[in-house]
Image: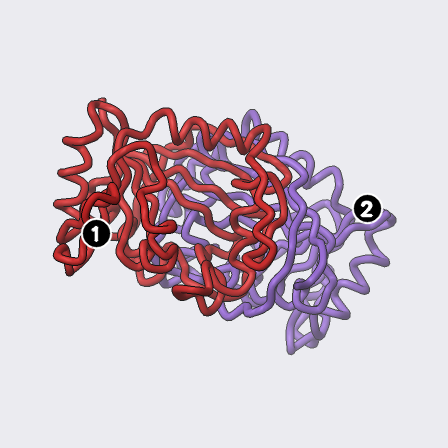
Chain colours: A red, B purple
Amino acid sequence: MTSVVATITMSLDGYITGPNDAPGRGLGEGGERLHYWVFGGPWTYDTEKLGAATGKDKEHLDRMMSSGGAVVGGRGTYDAAEAWGGTNPWPVPFFIVTHHPEDEPAGKGFTFVNGVEEAILRAREAAGGKNVDIMGGADVIRQALRAGHLDEVWITIAPVVLGGGKRLFDGFDESFDLDPIDATQSRYATHIRYRVLRRR
Amino acid sequence: MTSVVATITMSLDGYITGPNDAPGRGLGEGGERLHYWVFGGPWTYDTEKLGAATGKDKEHLDRMMSSGGAVVGGRGTYDAAEAWGGTNPWPVPFFIVTHHPEDEPAGKGFTFVNGVEEAILRAREAAGGKNVDIMGGADVIRQALRAGHLDEVWITIAPVVLGGGKRLFDGFDESFDLDPIDATQSRYATHIRYRVLRRR
């Protein structure tokens, strides 16, 4: 059965980017520290000597990859990531939420759709009974949570205080109960999975 | 050897109180959900049928109690908690940070001191080689972190999104690397312990 799952990494102070993120500047100042866990250790946008996740981090990543049947991402994230080099980096359909579906590049594995609702609907259809992963940005995750579409939140907390950037819950003023599924930890991350329970 | 440890509970969206906390209103709207883990399950300020922590929550609480030799808290927290009924609730010295040390009630186990620096200094002396626990509020923890006084952060994340209140890292604009020590989880909380590494 398909679950809609937000999968995202934030700092202990709640930021999913460092200060001043933008196309060409990745996740902003210090933002790469959020994702040391993905690449097995420290890296920077300058050196780009990227390794692979290990241990608990690899387990978490593998779980995401094996359970996901489609991915939903926001246009801002797509632009900030410079379209992941131009081609869908996932082995499953990738739906990009945008006000400009007509910008969709042909034959690159991205499907541009107008709005979070439609993106989740299309992704559910495409997921073949597997999960829909909502990988961000924060605004897309907030919209999905607010609209009652999220079944689970898989949050990775990087062991950093960033002191600035974009907060996952910026401007979010509703209250929800969550149900912890499990928690694992590596040197570079604490992975916590929750089921989303009722709105309070 | 004494470590100075911030020990505090926040929601997944980073709040250590719900909206509208104040003396007589405890931790604000829904704020008691932050501390279900302390009392073994749901409770409210109305019913006050409080149980005791169990399992991983009890282990975390016991670890705090057995390792702490002195506690530092802020005046706002002291007032919001209505002075814990009038007497120091901990079995160790309790230092309250306030601009008005002259307000100290006599013979109640509280020591009122002027400023975070002095509170930590006095608490270190009183701790007899055990830890100094900084239990909040957020401003006291932020000041201690900013001034380089924190050796560890023991953060408990309650499985709730509160949507408002006081954020632990409100207005905090510095960046730090942390080193995860361990993480445990119960139905009511995820307990993560970090060593504080360098400022970035």
Front position in the image: A8 or B147: A8
- Residue type of the residue flagged with mark 1: Pro
Front position in the image: B77 or A154: A154
Tag 2: Cα neighbours inside 10 Å, few (<14), some, or many (≥20)?
some
Front position in the image: B166 or A185: A185
Image quadrant occupied by the C terminus of chain B: bottom right
Front position in the image: A32 or B38: A32
Res A197 visible: no
Residue occupying image coordinates x 71% and y 69%? B147
Q: Secondary structure at mark 2?
A: loop
* Residue B31 placement, left or right of B132: left
Chain of the residue under label 1 = A
Image quarter of residue A134: top left
Image quarter of residue B139: bottom right
Q: What residue is shown with label 2? A: B130
Q: Which numbered marker is on residue B11?
A: none
Q: Secondary structure at mark 1?
A: loop
Chain of the residue under label 2 = B
Tag 1: Cα neighbours inside 10 Å, few (<14), some, or many (≥20)?
some
Res A12 visible: yes
Residue occupying image coordinates x 63% and y 30%? B59
- Report x, y in % for residue A138: 34, 54
- Report x, y in % for residue A153: 36, 38
Residue occupying image coordinates x 60% and y 47%? A49
**Residue at far front of view:** A107
- Residue type of the residue flagged with mark 2: Lys
Q: What residue is shown with label 1? A: A105
